[in-house]
Amino acid sequence: MSDELDSIRKQLDDIDRTILKALAQRQGLVKEVSDMKLKNEQGIRDLEREEQLLNRIRDLAHEVGLDRYYAEHLFREIITNSVRFQTHSLVDHQNEKSEGEVIRVSYQGTDGAYSHQAATRHFSDRYSTVDAIGYDTFQQAAQAVLDDKVDYALLPIENTTAGSINDTYDILGNEKLHIVGEEILKVVHCLMAVEQVELGKIRRIMSHPQAIAQCSQFLSKLPRCKVESYLDTAMSAKKVLEDGDLSQAAIAGAHAADLYGLHVIEHDIANQKENYTRFVVAAKEPVQVDVQIPAKTSLMMVTSNDEGSLIECLNILHKHKINMAKLESRPRLNEPWKYSFYLDILANIDDPEVSAGLDELNKKAEELKVLGCYPKQEA
């Protein structure tokens, strides 16, 4: 029985390798198509062709005895990845950034952190080498861009469980940085230790404060454990490895467990299973986004204390048919009871209607700062 099972598993491994090789080959063809579109100034997306492709996939799935919904779901993911690659290639092309070179990216944390994964994911399909450099704080990661030590900083700005990350908003509001992209990463928290020990033997758990908060329900069931805040999820995993104490564990991503050779004791322990972190990519210079690309624009606005001033500003967006995706307020430094408002609008500043709306908004608000216009990541 064991030999037969091992044989089947080997066949599955071989098929998985074949699938991955085929996807890599397909991605190479996508790059060729992207290069041709850029050369001939063609649009990056053909919705009619995409629907024709999905129709063929549904028919082929039925023909080979595979669930149609399952096949369509897989190929929608493949199409989304293709569009994502072509979108980034077009933005790089129009902003005279050549692909294939080494790119330097700063982030808060160490190897294996979620920020490290997001940085690698955002750039690795276009650049031969992503030199991701970890810093202790968000401010240090941002300063590395201002000091020309790196090309970009990747900063977390909001999480679907923990909410907004205020340090990033403060940095974007105060520093001369521009948002040029975004990356959304699914966060899967795991409990890991140096060996596959029983959960009841764990006495100390370390992780980043936000990860601890996101796993509060799981941790509440471990009353005999001492939970300690640490600088970063991956740093806590690294410390567990270095200490070699079987009573210690860390909360981090599975990537950190693989990197540091730790064993995952419990998988996916967050309160909310659909747990995502949105990161922004910050640079010294803004980028231009072609109007054919779905774009997002982030703003920082200060209004007067007059009654109805915020509503009047928001009505300007409504008047110009600008869809607001998010509104966030932050206290202004050294100005008690005064606030900065951070807005995300689903709009491109090169759109004449949007440009007119922002001009009108600029006249009404006490202060208006465009933090960046960038490609909207497709969900």
Image: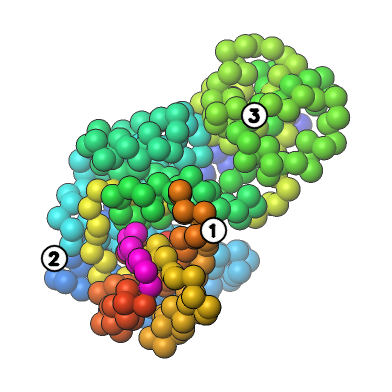
Name the residue that disc number 1 marks: 337
Residue 229 occupies quadrant: top right
Contact flag, marks 1 and 3 (Cβ < 8 Å): no
| Colour theme | rainbow
Label 1, label 2: how far apart the Cα atoms are: 53 Å
Q: Main secondary structure of the magenta part?
A: strand
Q: Amino acid at mark 3?
A: Ser
x%, y% of residue 272? 70, 52
Closer to the chain start, of discs 2 and 3, is 2
Label 2, label 3: how far apart the Cα atoms are: 51 Å
- The local crowd at label 3, few if under 14, some if 14 to 19, many if 20 or more residues have their Cα within 10 Å, is some
Q: Which residues are magenta?
A: 365-372
x%, y% of residue 9? 62, 37
Spot the residue most to the bottom.
Answer: 319
SS at mark 3 in the image? strand
Which residue is found at the position 79% from the left and 43% from the top? 217
Name the residue that disc number 2 marks: 39
